[in-house]
Image: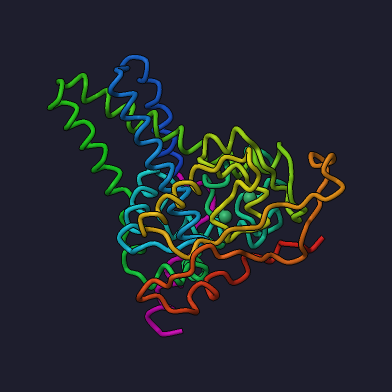
Amino acid sequence: MSEPLAALVETKPTKQGLNWLAVLWIGGLHVGMLLAPFTFTWSGLVVCAILYVLTGLGITLGYHRLLTHRSFQTPRIVEYLFAVLGVLANQGGPLKWVAAHRKHHAYADEDGDPHSPRQGFWWSHMLWWMHYDPVLDDPLEAHKNVKDLCRDPVYPFLDRWQLLPVLMLAGLLFGVGTLWGGVSLGLSWLVWGMFVRTPLVLHSTWFVNSAAHKWGYRNFNTRDTSTNLWWVALLSFGEGWHNNHHAYQRSARHGLLWWEVDVTYLLIRAFSVIWLAKDIHVAPKPDFGPNLESRRLTVIYPQRKASFVRIASMPIPGRSPGFLKENNHGYLRNVGRR
Ligand SMILES: [Zn+2]
Ligand SMILES: [Zn+2]
């Protein structure tokens, strides 16, 4: 380790205890929701719905399927756009979000999983991010799991300045609303676009970590407690098919059976039609064989090893061929071990 880096690490010990900044920020957004009945307008509701979809997809398509798992390829500009939409969801910058989620897969439900459901429903839902994590918030360890993202200066920048786009959006909502219909409309757009929409998106994501590790059915015998839960899938644009996802983490398609509607995957397929998505990884359908009737309880693992069907395979210029392999290190360790 170089001298300056050693000095930096020594003077910056790992933070411990409650992350008060996160608690006050997210808590404040929830308190602001109380203003919703007093500021309701139909256009405010439309603003809320549009931003719910856009920032929700920023998490599911951007942070999760693209940045964490590289389940498909898209031009850089589209990647950055969805990363910014992810930042606007108020779930932290891309580096920490991706690092936490990769750790969740690497240690699913065990020690080392930042939001292990074995520590209780509320821990996995929302208590976990209120506390500093010994690894994710360690100055030396923090970026080890996201070296691929750190090579691109855009992601460290977005991570560092994550509040900037959020505050700009809040100002834009209030400003444009006020110009359109006076201060009361500006306030309505601000409250419904920020203080109502953000907690709704937050809880839809958090339910993936809590409810989709507790209720629902399992298609695959993964060694974690992940489940497929329809209402979480509807709220989170397909992320609720979480057992399928734990079995085939690199798959861009999470809903594998006909009723497992997966809006994020449908959008990725739509992108592929207009050349905005390539090299899409898709998991095979579950094969229940003679045990179909016991699907709710059991769990037939159809293959011992994860494999993927490539439905498109056109390289994107500028990406090294070894990138995805290196990036996927360790993420499949919980498949097929039982
Ligand atoms: Zn999980
Ligand atoms: Zn994942």
Question: Farthest residue in the bottom direction?
Answer: 2
Whether residue 4 appears in magenta in the rendering, the answer is yes
Q: Is residue 300 left or right of residue 271?
A: right
Nearer to the camera, 60 or 154: 60
Question: Farthest residue in the top direction?
Answer: 38
**Colour option used:** rainbow
Q: Which residues are drawn in magenta?
A: 1-20
Above or below, 201 against 147 in this view is above
Above or below, 300 against 279 in this view is above
Q: Position of residue 180 (x, y in %)?
A: 14, 25
Q: Position of residue 248 (x, y in %)?
A: 64, 58
Q: Is residue 88 left or right of residue 311?
A: left
The residue shown at (63%, 41%) is 258
Above or below, 56 against 136 in this view is above
- Tell me the quadrant of the picture where the C terminus can be found: bottom right
Q: Is residue 137 visible?
A: no
The residue shown at (54%, 75%) is 326
The residue shown at (31%, 48%) is 163
Nearer to the camera, 336 or 165: 336
Q: Position of residue 21 (x, y in %)?
A: 41, 45
Q: Is residue 232 left or right of residue 168?
A: right
